[in-house]
Amino acid sequence: MRALLKSTLPLMLVTALAACSGGADRLAGGDSTVQMGRAALSGGAPAIALQVGAGMLKDHPQDADALALQADALSALGRGAEAVPVYRQLLALDPHSVNAHIGLGRVLMGTDAAAAENEFLAVLAEAPNTPIAANNLGIARDLQGRHAEAQAAYRSALGMAPSMQAASVNLALSLSVSGRPAEAIPLLRPLAEAPSADAKTRQDLAVALAMAGDRAAAARLLGQDMSPDDVEVALRQFVALAKH
């Protein structure tokens, strides 16, 4: 949930996608090749991961591990439209793949939140104790304006994983945009005031403070990371969100 200054609904927190595991026959030595691709992906080199996956798929076009690697790499590169058919191919091979449903849901989030919601519901039907799916379900519902249902999903995620900061932040900002910023502040303050807090976390709390009417406190927080002019711009946007 980091695009706050660019959107009237700042709920696009992207949760890390777990590595997919396939049910197809493994290539000889394929495990080490997949591990190399996964290491590149987790190390911030999705283009290399994409090359690894493409190389595997030349000779084994139905290998689930290679398809998962290719889809995840395309997603990480911001090429969601290309990732969608790859995730669908993977799901045709294994309709119960939790990670493929999560990956597909995440790439659909920006264009079809209702379709994304169905993917996360499919995960929770298959594996009810999956907090990543519950958190993403909340985002999909928030994007459709169904804030109460979104908040229920975030609370469900926190019930499964009480320390899941992503769900806490999403719940707080969902409360803020649905007219309940005072309830969001206690969720965000410990995160924003922690020694390890970054500028984005402080901004999240500033949103709730501004929407609750405490403009001065929001300005002080934002002033730690922004120029006075940028603080004023941000505050105006936050106040506009409160009136939305």
Image (cartoon, rainbow, N blue to C red):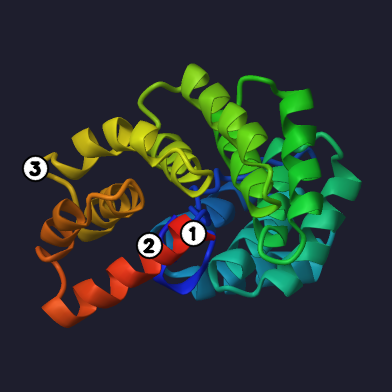
The amino acid beneath tag 1 is Lys
The amino acid beneath tag 3 is Pro
Label 3, label 1: how many angstroms apart (C-alpha)? 32 Å
**What residue is disc 1 on?**
243
Give the x, y percent position of residue 4.
Answer: 42, 64
Q: Is residue 27 visible?
A: no
Label 2, label 3: how many angstroms apart (C-alpha)? 27 Å
Residue at image point 77% right, 71% down: 58
Give the x, y percent position of residue 239.
Answer: 38, 62
Residue at image point 29% right, 77% down: 233
Residue at image point 22% right, 37% down: 189
- Is there CB contact under 8 Å for labels 3 and 1? no
Picture quadrant of residue 9: bottom right
Quadrant location of the N terminus? bottom left
Quadrant location of the C terminus? bottom right
Q: Nearer the viewer, mark 2 or mark 3?
A: 2
- Is there CB contact under 8 Å for labels 1 and 2? yes
Q: Where is 199 relative to 153, above or below?
A: below
**11 relative to 55 in the view: left or right:** left
Secondary structure of the residue carrying tag 1 is helix
